[in-house]
Image (cartoon, helix red, strand yellow):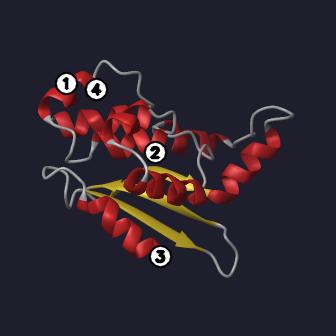
Amino acid sequence: MRWSKLKQCVEANFAKALKGRVALHSTAYGNCTCGHAWFTLDGDVIANFCTRASGNRMSWRIEGPLPLTDEQTKRYQDQPVEYGEVSRQHVYQSCWEFIHDLSIGEALEDDDPLIQSLAVIDKRLGKRRLKQACDIDLHPLARKLLEIRMN
């Protein structure tokens, strides 16, 4: 399935209060698979998923954490997803699983931060379950989106 169709399917399931406010984006650079995907809230980037940073981070795990400059550290400190934690391809895979393979309950309990995040902004998550989701151990990105939805 093409990204545009997958994005449309995912965003069609957003809660009424968040439709038009939260959006998924993705871009590729040239003919390679490098690129990035990102979440926006009211036009501001709240999470950035970079393929190259993810690859660099994986290669540095053996020797230690990826060294970031002071400027990069300041820029990514406020983001709920650690820079390089997730790649663009992972975003596609998570969106596919969320749409085709998982119930809303399974998605909330999933270890994948993107699947959890999509679950908390999904319209199938009713008021009662939304309150119960506050007690679940969620990834910081999912927690941030849950707080936005609760407000």
| Amino acid found under the numbered disc labelled 1 | Lys
* C-beta proximity under 8 Å, tags 4 and 3: no
* C-beta proximity under 8 Å, tags 1 and 4: yes
As drawn, is 35 to the left or to the right of 132?
A: right
* Relative to 71, residue 77 above or below: above
| Amino acid found under the numbered disc labelled 2 | Leu
CA neighbours of label 1 inside 10 A, class few (<14), some (14 to 19), many (20+) = few
Residue under pointer 3: 2
As drawn, is 147 to the left or to the right of 59?
A: left
Residue under pointer 4: 133
Of mark 4 and mark 2, the one earlier in the sequence is 2
As drawn, is 56 to the left or to the right of 62?
A: left
Of mark 4 and mark 3, the one earlier in the sequence is 3
Q: Marks 2 and 3, how far apart in space?
A: 19 Å
Q: Marks 4 and 2, how far apart in space?
A: 15 Å
CA neighbours of label 4 inside 10 A, class few (<14), some (14 to 19), many (20+) = some
Q: Marks 2 and 1, how far apart in space?
A: 20 Å
Q: Secondary structure at mark 1?
A: helix
Residue under pointer 1: 131
Residue under pointer 2: 114
What is the x, y in percent for residue 43?
A: 30, 60
CA neighbours of label 3 inside 10 A, class few (<14), some (14 to 19), many (20+) = few
| Amino acid found under the numbered disc labelled 3 | Arg
- Work out whether residue 80 or residue 71 is closer to the camera in this orientation and state it: 80
Of mark 2 and mark 3, the one earlier in the sequence is 3
Of mark 2 and mark 1, the one earlier in the sequence is 2
Q: Marks 1 and 4, how far apart in space?
A: 5 Å
